[in-house]
Image (cartoon, grey):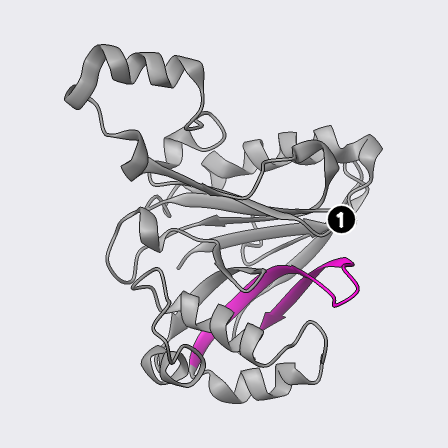
Amino acid sequence: MCKIAMMSGIKPKYIKNAWELSKALAPYMSHSDDDGFGYAAITKSGDIFIERWLDNDLAFKYKEDNKHDKAMKEQLGEAIVPLESNYTSVGKVDKNNAVAIILHSRMATCAKGIKNVHPFIVDNVALIHNGVISNHTQVLNKYDANNTKMSTCDSEAIAFAYSGNKVGSVPAGIKELGQDLSGYYACGVLSKTESGKPYMDVFKSASANLYGAFIPQVDAFLYSTSLDI
């Protein structure tokens, strides 16, 4: 199973510590879940940004516009993995203004590849998932009739269902979301309300594990599917 970790309510004075914790967690989460690593963060103004790496060892160490990496590609050409196949990003990376961060290390249950690395984003809903959704095809048929999905991963269907049920503005929609999904899941979501207020949402199926601990160094709770984390 994948590993996920989430923290919200990060104050400006602790943001550096929050990112240091995220970087420290990346290799630990990737010990047995090394089919990709990604994170999503949301700013106090409700803007989401995402970075994903297919090679877990490059998490937080590699960025497409990094001058050193560009120079290496120019020198080595096809001798190295093309940048585009190993890294993707969404939105403007604005780490100093982040108020919540969600992290995901993947153990593939379907095709490996950068397009299946979490988080997934649908209609300003960024989602990470641990588990397996057995009826994802039916969920996509219901909420993605125009076939706009970007991956072949069952987890993306949850993002479509979360957005389709408007859970961010109608919290009671989480009940229908639960009725839509068959399988095992623990999820973290970043999004914003209709008024633009950022939030983190955490939900799970009855059988899924989810733990929480207060981390004094970031003055926030960390939630994870791994008790060791």
Mark 1 sits on what residue? 45
Compare residues 161 and 30 and report the one nearer the observer: 161
Q: In the rendering, at what x and y percent does residue 118 appear? A: 44, 53
Screen quadrant of the N terminus: bottom left
Q: Quadrant of residue 138?
A: bottom left
Compare residues 98 and 203 and report the one nearer the observer: 98
* Residue under the point 21% across and 23% down: 80
- The correct choice, above or below, for 186 with respect to 63 in the image is below
Give yes or no for residue 57 being in the magenta stretch: no
Secondary structure of residue under mark 1? loop
Task: Count neighbours of disc 1 (C-alpha within 10 A) and say few if under 14, some if 14 to 19, many if 20 or more.
Answer: few
The amino acid pointed to by label 1 is Ser
* Residue under the point 19% across and 18% down: 77
**In screen coordinates, is 38 left or right of 167?**
left
Give yes or no for residue 204 being in the magenta stretch: yes
Compare residues 228 and 47 and report the one nearer the observer: 47
Magenta: main secondary structure equals strand
Q: In the rendering, at what x and y percent does residue 132 appear? A: 38, 71
